Image (cartoon, helix red, strand yellow):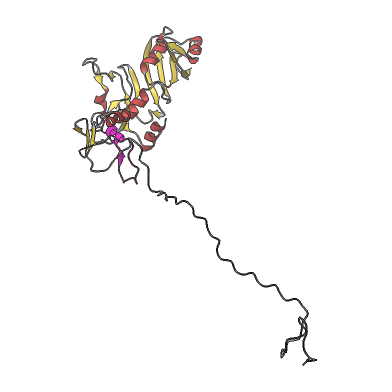
Amino acid sequence: MNNSGGNKKGSGARPNSTRPSSNKPKPAMAKRAQGPKKVKPTTKVEAVDPNKIEKKPNQAPKRPKVKDEIRLNKYISNSGACSRRDADIYIQSGNVKVNGIPVIEMGYMVKPGDVVNFDGSVLTPEKKEYILLNKPKNFTTAFDEGQENRNVLELVRGSTNSKIAAVGRMDKNTTGLLLFTNDTDMIRKFSLPSQKSSKIYQVSLDKNLKFEDLEKINKGLVIDGHRVFVEDVSYIENEAKSEIGLKLKTSNVKVVRAIFESFKYDVLRIDRVSFAGLTKKNLPRGNWRFLTEQEIINLKNT
């Protein structure tokens, strides 16, 4: 039996529906949700521990620094036994023990309370001392010039119990600034020809210095086969032309004397008025003083 009210396929409203019919196209079906993509298996890589430090041959393992600890070679140098460079040689040779155990590792750190045995002797590190003296005449840095010339160490006796030594040499007739220390590294530093700090000398000659000779000295000269570089040479203002100011890097007073003697002048007196930035200000002849912390830093950086 045919129903005249029947709906044709794809047209008309649904039966028993109160919603009006619409010819608008239906929205597209939402895409089915996809699961996570499969990850291809990869070769397992071992995680690297950032705190793990590879130990190299002949090198102490690095670790957080403990308060007041110090490198072994510096500890040995501070004790006055030898320089840091020489201490490294002793360490590598196995002649250094810490708490009874031989140490051959460079950079080993000594902690407070450690007992360091150096070549058979227990070391006691000393505090570094730096003393500046305004040296008078008739005192020498040598130990073999007889009783008539006293040693400069007499002038700083009582300043410290540490074993100090003069930086450079001075004869009995040379006056002025002389540095003393138990810092073997600094003593060695200022004895090297390559050191860069300037010294200023006031030189008294037996006669006036000719201007042409002053010009020749200012250009530099060769003494005993060695080139001597002069930073500055000039007449001292308001003084006779036999009073000369000389600026150069060497701390060897013999070089100062040799410069003028090579031009046939006799040197009557040499006074060192400046040493690596240190001056005689407020330091009368024959007196000494300790260097300030800033002066020590400046010396180490020159």
Relative image position of residue 127 (x, y in whole percent): 28, 36
Answer left or right for 224 relative to 1: left
Q: Is residue 284 visible?
A: no
Taking the spot 27% from the left edge, 18% from the top edge, the residue there is: 142
Taking the spot 53% from the left edge, 60% from the top edge, the residue there is: 38
Is 20 or 187 nearer to us in this picture? Answer: 20
Q: Tell me the magenta residue range.
A: 59-80
Taking the spot 31% from the left edge, 23% from the top edge, the residue there is: 135
Specify the quadrant of the image occupied by residue 156: top left
Q: Residue furthest right?
A: 4
Residue 20 to residue 230: above or below: below
Specify the quadrant of the image occupied by residue 197: top left
Specify the quadrant of the image occupied by residue 32: bottom right
Q: Is residue 75 magenta?
A: yes
Locate the C terminus by quadrant: top left
Residue 258 to residue 36: above or below: above
